[in-house]
Amino acid sequence: MINIYEVTETNQMIEQENLDVRTITLGISLMDCIDSDLEKLNDKIYKKITTLAKDLVKTGQDIEQEYGIPIVNKRISITPISLIGAAACKTSEDFVTIAKTLDAAAKEVGVNFIGGYSALVSKGMTPAEEALIRSIPEALAVTERVCSSVNVGSTKTGINMDAVKLCGEIVKATAEATADRDSLGCAKLVIFCNAPDDNPFMAGAFLGVTEADAVINVGVSGPGVVKHAIEQVRGQGFEQLCETIKKTAFKITRVGQLVAGEASKRLGIPFGIIDLSLAPTPAVGDSIAEILEEIGLERVGAPGTTAALAMLNDQVKKGGVMASSYVGGLSGAFIPVSEDQGMIDAVNAGSLTLEKLEAMTCVCSVGLDMIAIPGKTKASTISGIIADEMAIGMVNQKTTAVRLIPVIGKDVGEIAEFGGLLGYAPIMPVNEFDCSDFVNRKGRIPAPIHSFKN
């Protein structure tokens, strides 16, 4: 039974500490929409999304009002479009028509993002998958709500370096295609290693082919709640600190479990997973960086940062898995620069560099996220950064990702403005020594020896 103390405590977390359900994401399989006729395919996609998701936003709003729990985003994830469009799409331009259909469907049902304009190419690329990847710059330039991702590596298959090279070029082309908006298109493009099938968080959400026809996945978030909790054990030992984080993560995840169950029941769609990630926002007091600084760092990036983040991530997972039987997605601590005021401050103070962020990605949930770099950065350099991050994921059997934004026309020290939840970011310097001979080698980096478990 829930007692009055727990009710009061949850209300305080919501009102004073920025606790929210970050997203209810409706996953929709488009496998039954496949058609060799492009016009019919687009029609089927639009009808299925607008039929299944017609009540998603209203249901989220109803739950929000009834329980007093903020639900920030209502979103949709779909089967990777490289699979759905393969029979009908002969060119990149054909794929762009699907992106426009997805954008129209997302607008019709009122969601802010739809994810799944994606290709999974960790071992090789079909002609359709390559065509979709090459269509990404135009697709993200002509749509508002479509998000794209490419999985180029995994622990089981290694890293597809042909895809890594191509993706570096695509990131640069996407930046140029949206140069008038501080290269905003790149904020909607993620390059993955070990991408999960059930991630509810944008921009990397898609619905894997192992999933049901429709499923509700929920992402919770509460950096402010965790920071407030560990303020109460300031100066105490690691045992007390870890116990506090675990207990807090449990409470946060229970709120998400409640919302997920209600959304599933009201929409008549099965519940999938809770993603218990700590996802920051630009709001004051809603920062992963501030948590790490409360643990004992003068600034994020100082010696000890990676250890503090590893501990935080592990305790969040340990607390969360006790609160829900179905934990999935990414689950842990996100470290996006533009979406976290504490990270922005650390970059401006000179304590946080791209190299330190890469080290931190070895132990956090995702990877190099929402990092603005000079627009003049070469495509091969971007590919090299992607390859480094994919290697971390492959060897450590974890999900890693890259969301770099080469801001065309801007250089180190200037600011890129993305707006809303995406925030703003100082342009960070990049190591400019050349890696093109490495990137231009063809083929794939083999999977590590520990991947062979049959």
Image: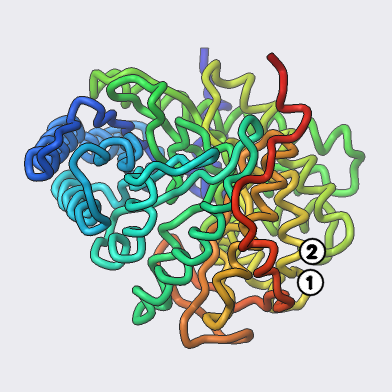
The residue to which callout 2 is attached is 301
Q: Residue drawn 47% across and 36% down?
A: 199
Q: Nearer the viewer, residue 325 or 8?
A: 325
The residue to which callout 1 is attached is 351
Q: Nearer the viewer, residue 387 or 345?
A: 387
Q: Residues within 10 Å of mark 1 (few under 14, many from 20)?
A: some
Q: Is residue 100 visible?
A: yes
- As drawn, the label of residue 27 is none
Q: Of all residues shown, which one is farthest toward the front?
A: 442
Q: Position of residue 319 (x, y in %)?
A: 67, 27
Q: Do the residues under discs 1 and 2 have CB atoms within 8 angstroms? A: yes
Does dot 1 land on a helix, a strand or a loop? Answer: loop
Q: Quadrant of residue 215?
A: top left
* Residue 234 to residue 240: above or below: below
Q: Quadrant of residue 449?
A: top right
Q: Nearer the viewer, residue 442 or 138?
A: 442
The reply, left or right, for residue 84 in relation to residue 2 is: left
Q: Residue drawn 38% across and 54% down?
A: 133
Does dot 2 land on a helix, a strand or a loop? Answer: loop
Q: Residue drawn 77% across and 58% down?
A: 293
Q: Position of residue 320 (x, y in %)?
A: 62, 27
- Distance from Cα at disc 1 to Cα at disc 2: 5 Å
Q: Amino acid at mark 2?
A: Gly
* Residue 270 to residue 289: above or below: above
Q: Is residue 224 visible?
A: no
Q: Residue drawn 55% across and 83% down?
A: 376
The reply, left or right, for residue 98 in relation to residue 432 is: left
Q: Position of residue 391 (x, y in %)?
A: 70, 47
Q: Amino acid at mark 1?
A: Ser
Q: Position of residue 397 (x, y in %)?
A: 69, 33
Quarter of the image for the C terminus: give it: top right
Number of labels in the image equals 2
